[in-house]
Amino acid sequence: MDCIFCKITSGQIPTNFVAVSEHAVAFNDISPRQPLHVLVVPKKHFTDVSELTKAAPEILADLMALAVQVAGDKSEGSFRLSFNTGEKAGQSVFHAHAHVTSVEPR
């Protein structure tokens, strides 16, 4: 599989992680759309959040907890948490991931 997020989570592509949990990692987006833009990615490959939800709700719960932790650590309290599912919705990397964004970074 030639998935960039799989390469990041496995350490094949060196990345400075913002936070790490048992099942997920968080790192800064290389093309941020807000002053704070962090991606939270499961370590295991799932195509999108729909597949992740059906196949591994415990991994989704871990990913969500990590996203909330990142938002608490990196924002002033106002943040957006979003998933793009499918190309028409803006998904460009087909490995499930959440975007934590805020106009008020810490």
Image (cartoon, rainbow, N blue to C red):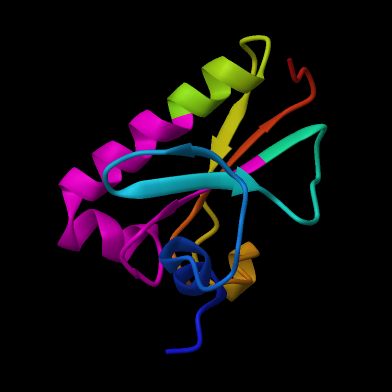
Q: What is the x, y in percent for residue 17? A: 56, 44
Q: Judge from the rendering whether residue 35 lies leftward or rightward of residue 82; answer left or right.
A: right
38 relative to 54, above or below:
above
Q: Judge from the rendering whether residue 78 lies leftward or rightward of residue 83; answer left or right.
A: right
Give the quadrant of the C terminus.
Answer: top right
Of 78 and 88, the residue lying toward us:
78
Q: Residue furthest bottom?
A: 1
Q: What is the x, y in percent for residue 92? A: 63, 71
Q: What is the x, y in percent for residue 39? A: 58, 48
35 relative to 50, above or below:
above
Q: Judge from the rendering whether residue 76 lies leftward or rightward of residue 25; answer left or right.
A: right
Q: Residue furthest top?
A: 76
Give the quadrant of the N terminus.
Answer: bottom left
**Residue sitting at 35 percent across and 59 percent down?**
43
Secondary structure predominantly adopted by residues drawn in magenta: helix
**Residue sitting at 29 percent across and 66 percent down?**
51
Magenta stretch containing residue 66, yes or no?
Answer: yes
**Residue sitting at 62 percent across and 48 percent down?**
16
Q: What is the x, y in percent for residue 80? A: 61, 30
How many labels sit on residues? Answer: 0
Q: Which residues are magenta?
A: 38-67
Q: Quadrant of residue 36?
A: top right
